[in-house]
């Protein structure tokens, strides 16, 4: 199956915490960074996700926010440090490619945000992703 979701980063499940309806799944990305996905408990069961499972973390580019440094005092726990590799701007929006350890991410943000943050190839950034915006796929 092919997907339009650009951001697909491989990793290994390190922990699963289940509740009645939702579960949190901690994933160690191939580059060593950790992320957490919040998915349904049914999805955990249906996909057979357990500690040690190989997964791909999937995130739509529109769900990736960028900051010029780590952000404190925010509920978003997934903060991946990286370096901008490319910026393509249009009339209103921009596509920003970010190299992170173990892969790459694309963020779809406004052209105004690119300008305000001074983003260009080589800029250090932190990609912010809510755990509820990360989907998991198994092989």
Image: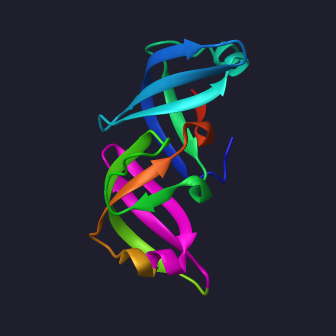
Count of number-bearing discs: 0
Residue shown at the point (69%, 40%) measured from the top left: 1
Q: Position of residue 14 (x, y in %)?
A: 41, 18
**Residue 106 image offset from top left, x and y in percent:** 49, 59
* Name of the residue lying farthest toward the bottom: 91
Left or right position of 38 against 68: right
- Left or right of residue 15, residue 137 in this image: right
Q: How is colour applied across the structure in the image?
A: rainbow
Specify the farthest residue to the front.
73
Q: Nearer the viewer, residue 113 or 102?
A: 113
Locate residue 12 relative to residue 49 in the image: left or right. Answer: left
Residue in the picture at 69% in, 21% down: 43
Quadrant of residue 21 in the image?
A: top right
In the image, is residue 4 part of the stretch drawn in magenta?
no
Q: Is residue 101 within the magenta segment? A: yes
Query: At 61% from the left edge and 42% from the top edge, which residue is drawn?
Result: 133
Name the quadrant of the C terminus: top right
Please state the horizontal and vertical placement of residue 53, each as a whole percent of the image: 48, 18
**Residue occupying the point 29% across, 34% down:** 32
Towards the viewer: 27 or 6: 27
Which stretch did the figure color magenta?
Answer: 92-114
Residue 23 vs residue 114: left or right?
A: right
Q: In the image, is residue 93 above or below residue 54? A: below
Q: Quadrant of residue 83?
A: bottom left
The kind of secondary structure the magenta stretch mainly shows is strand
Q: Give 51 or 23, whichever is nearer the viewer.
A: 23
């Amino acid at each position: 199956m092919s997907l339009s979701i650009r951001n697909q980063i491989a990793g290994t499940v390190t922990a699963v915490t289940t509740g009645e309806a939702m579960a949190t799944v901690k994933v160690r990305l191939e580059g060593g960074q950790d992320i957490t996905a919040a998915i349904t408990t049914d999805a955990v069961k249906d996909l057979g996700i357990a500690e040690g499972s190989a997964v791909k973390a999937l995130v739509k580019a529109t769900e990736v926010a960028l900051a010029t440094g780590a952000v404190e005092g925010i509920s978003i726990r997934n903060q991946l440090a990286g370096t901008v590799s490319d910026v393509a701007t249009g009339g209103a929006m921009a596509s920003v490619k970010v190299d992170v350890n173990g892969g790459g991410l694309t963020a779809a943000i406004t052209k105004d945000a690119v300008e305000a943050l001074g983003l260009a190839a080589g800029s250090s950034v932190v990609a912010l992703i809510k755990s509820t915006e990360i989907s998991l796929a198994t092989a």
